[in-house]
Image: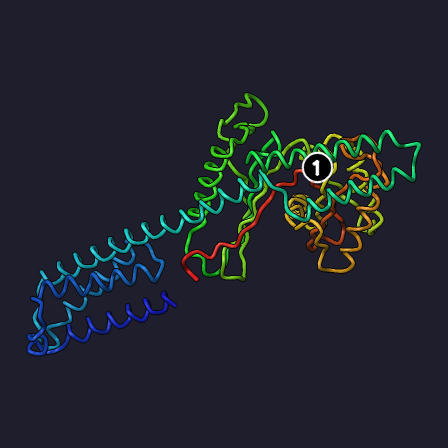
Amino acid sequence: MRKRVGQIGTLFGFLLIVVFSFAPAKTIAYLPLKDKSLHLLAYAVVAFLMQLTTGQRGRVVFLAISTLGALIEVFQPLFGRSFDFFDIVANCVGALLGVSLAIVYQKLKETRVQRGLIERVKTTLMDASIHLEEGLVKQLQWMSSETARKMEEAPTERAAYEASLEVLAMIQENLRLADVNKMAMCQDTGMVVAFVEIGTAVPLSMHAIERAIYQGAEEAIKEGLFRNSVVKEPVFARENTNTNLPPIIYWSPSQAKNLKISLMLKGFGSENCSALAMLNPTASQEGVIEAVAQIVKEAGGKPCPPIVVGVGLGGTSERAALLSKKALLREVGLPHEEANYADLEQKIMDKIQTLKIGPGGFGGPLTALAVAIEYEPTHIAGLPVAVSISCWADRKGSFIWEGPYV
């Protein structure tokens, strides 16, 4: 709406300039400002509005308006007005002034808008490091009660079940202490992973959003006392960045107006157990279930179970891996919106439970807290299956940022 008003104002300003430039001299003699001041002001206002509403580079706007001013001055003698070189100078100075003011205004506005986004990123990450989502907390409670129930039915496996209950009790105590002391629930505060969905009305550039994510993450890492766990390059020196940065950012357009950012703190005990299986197209759901179960079986107790499992199906190998990470963002306890994929999620979860890896890898009856699937179209010749595993500390948070542009 504001942009439309600005565009109408720009067009109206151009029309006024043209009308008064070619009107008889006696018509404008009654205007309150002197000729050169009027030229400078008129072109400054139009340049200011055009710069704000067109999204063009400043030099393009300046050249367009200055050229218009020069052409008008050249053609004025045909309408009984005189050519004045200093009018062209005043027009150019006005255009430069208007563009400059608009750029300064845009920078100040972007800085103010960006600060609000930085705060949301920071608070979301800090909260994610301390608190688990409600659905995941409920699943941990369910696993405790269900393990205790199953223990009564399997006296020969009592030792493994008791060990599982002890691990689950320690997790609950860990969460309590994290909340009381407002400190990270796990020593591995992970890498920051961000999924950014840019809506149609977002006034910030991708570069500005990226800067906000970097700064918000940096402030969260410092205030939340996150462990510095990122190295500059992966093979040779492996020198620590000493900032736990940079974050990993994935971008996608959105049909919504708003900006949505989903953040994850991905620890690497579980990340190291993620894997990819490229199945034959004839594998069907049974093949998918077996492939995921095999990956989880090979991981065993290494990802610090109980675990949350994200499964990516389709696309290409790298897309499937990305989808599996995106699947971890879904709220725990919320099944896939398509019934057949929701059923597949449950079948995978049931299969994982039969592996009896158990909390801490001690062999309890339950291993998975949740399974989530994301999929997309793929080639007729393949069925990519990627698995991203998160330990019980599946730390994430999302927010829709409306900012001042709604």
Looking at the picture, how far across and down is residue 211, in whole percent?
Answer: 43, 43
356 left or right of 370? right
Q: Which scheme is used to colour this image of the protein?
A: rainbow
278 left or right of 58? right
Q: Residue at x 42, y 49 (%)?
A: 116
Label 1 Cα neighbours within 10 Å, binned few <14 / some 14-19 / many ≥20: many
Looking at the picture, how far across and down is residue 83, in whole percent?
Answer: 9, 67
Compared with 268, 117 (above or below) is below
Looking at the picture, how far across and down is residue 199, in whole percent?
Answer: 50, 58
Q: Quadrant of residue 296?
A: top right
Residue situated furthest top in the rendering: 237
Residue situated furthest front in the rendering: 180
Q: Which residue is mark 1?
A: 274
Camera-side residue of 387 and 281: 387
Give the residue type that dot 1 points to: Ser
The N terminus, quarter of image: bottom left
Camera-side residue of 79 and 37: 37
Give the secondary structure at mark 1: loop
The C terminus, quarter of image: bottom left
Q: Residue at x 43, y 46 (%)?
A: 207
Q: Quadrant of residue 99?
A: bottom left
274 left or right of 79? right
Camera-side residue of 266 and 44: 266
Q: Residue at x 84, y 44 (%)?
A: 351
* Marker count (numbered): 1
Looking at the picture, how far across and down is residue 158, in whole percent?
Answer: 88, 32
174 left or right of 291? left
Compared with 84, 188 (above or below) is above
Q: Residue at x 82, y 43 (%)?
A: 146
